[in-house]
Amino acid sequence: MIISIKDAAKLFSVSIMSCCAVFVCTLFLNFRIDLVAMKDQILTPMLVAYDALLNTSVVVCAVTGGCLLITAVIMMIFYIKHYIDTHKKELGILKALGYPRKKIAASFSLFGISVLLGTFVGFGGALGFMPIFYESQNEDGLICEVLFHAHFELLFCLVILPSLMFGLLAVVYAYFKLKASTLSLIKDDKGSFQKVKKVKTRENLSFLDDLKRTTVKSRKSLIFFIIFASFCYGAMTQMSYSMKDLSSEIMGAMMLMIGLLLAFVTLLLAVTTLVNGNIKTIAMMKVFGYSTSECRKAILNGYRPLSYIGFSLGTIYQYGLLRIMVDVVFADYPNMVAYEFDVPAFFFSLITFILIYELFMCFFSSRIHHISIKEIMLEG
């Protein structure tokens, strides 16, 4: 077996993304199906609130589910590319032994197991949480009480179908990436996988500043993950405070938990990949006498401005989304609470974000400090 279950299990972050997306979508889609089924029971005075609840389910599923789906796809591609880059020689030997490219690529379908696991847990968790969710939706008495009915057709749409699609995506992408010749794979020829661009260096830049800039440019995929992690933290933490007034405390708590989980998992993935990908560079810097703080400055500090950009985008996103919910979706609802930008929540979220981000950097600074020069030299 070319791809083992153990290899597929490494896509833990994809499982987390899939779990969160399916958890949210299952709650709101199941609630929407039950809402549609009781349309004949809705009286005229309740129509405004009824339509608002229907629109809310669509907006939440489209925005949250769509965003997480795109991110999961990007993570899946990132992991497959990383796997191929780190197993080029083994894959090249298989091709040399006569294994067709289609057969090798087909084994990458096992990466779909990570999506299956995440979506199944998310669906099961949503079913367990459903009675509490329905109770929170009914507590305001805006419309007739909506009774919970499990709709297992969502199991196919949100669990089985996405898992099959991600498995197919893994196979197609792997087939494309394995197009390189057998010899280039065995020789670990990086030129066949990516075009190396000449980076112009400025004479007025110090070595550490130049290395910091080069590190960021050489790992552009990590830019997305750093920005996305900060985006999730900024958007979800601030949105959770507003949800307590606009919806319910349960919705606020759910937003906060999902946001923190996505932010921590994504940031951990990004920084771990960054440090592991620069172990030899860090070891050589230590050989030439550079301190741990200088290694950290060159490898990690280049991404700090990007994290603040992500946080800012998350702040703008949550404000714009809530504005749309209040001014468009619930525009005709007479008892809707007025929404304004929550300044205290913003500063609280910003301060905690800075503290958590710097704690992450301190943790990985200790990882850099303990990198063994002797071990790296023996590997070479």
Image (cartoon, rainbow, N blue to C red):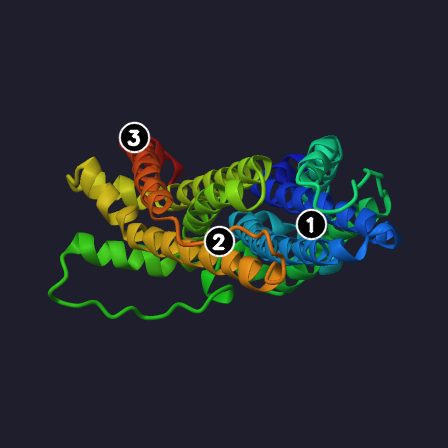
Tag 3–tag 1 contact (CB < 8 Å): no
Residue sitting nearer the eye, 85 or 313: 313
Residue type at mark 1: give it: Phe
The CA span between labels 2 and 3 is: 47 Å
| Residue 108's disc number | 1
Q: Where does the image place residue 329, in percent across and percent down from the top left?
A: 62, 61
On the image, the x and y values in percent for residue 169 come to 69, 58
| Residue 88, x across and y down, in percent | 55, 52
Residue at x-position 76% and y-position 35%: 127
Question: To which residue does mark 3 refer?
Answer: 366
Image quarter (top left, top right, bottom left or bottom right) of the N terminus? top right
User: To which quarter of the image does residue 376 belong?
Assistant: top left
Instruction: Count how many numbered circles sit on residues in the image.
Output: 3
Secondary structure at numbered mark 1: helix
- The residue positioned 63% from the left and 53% from the top of the image is 60
- Crowdedness near tag 1: few (<14), some (14–19) or many (≥20) residues, C-alpha within 10 Å: many
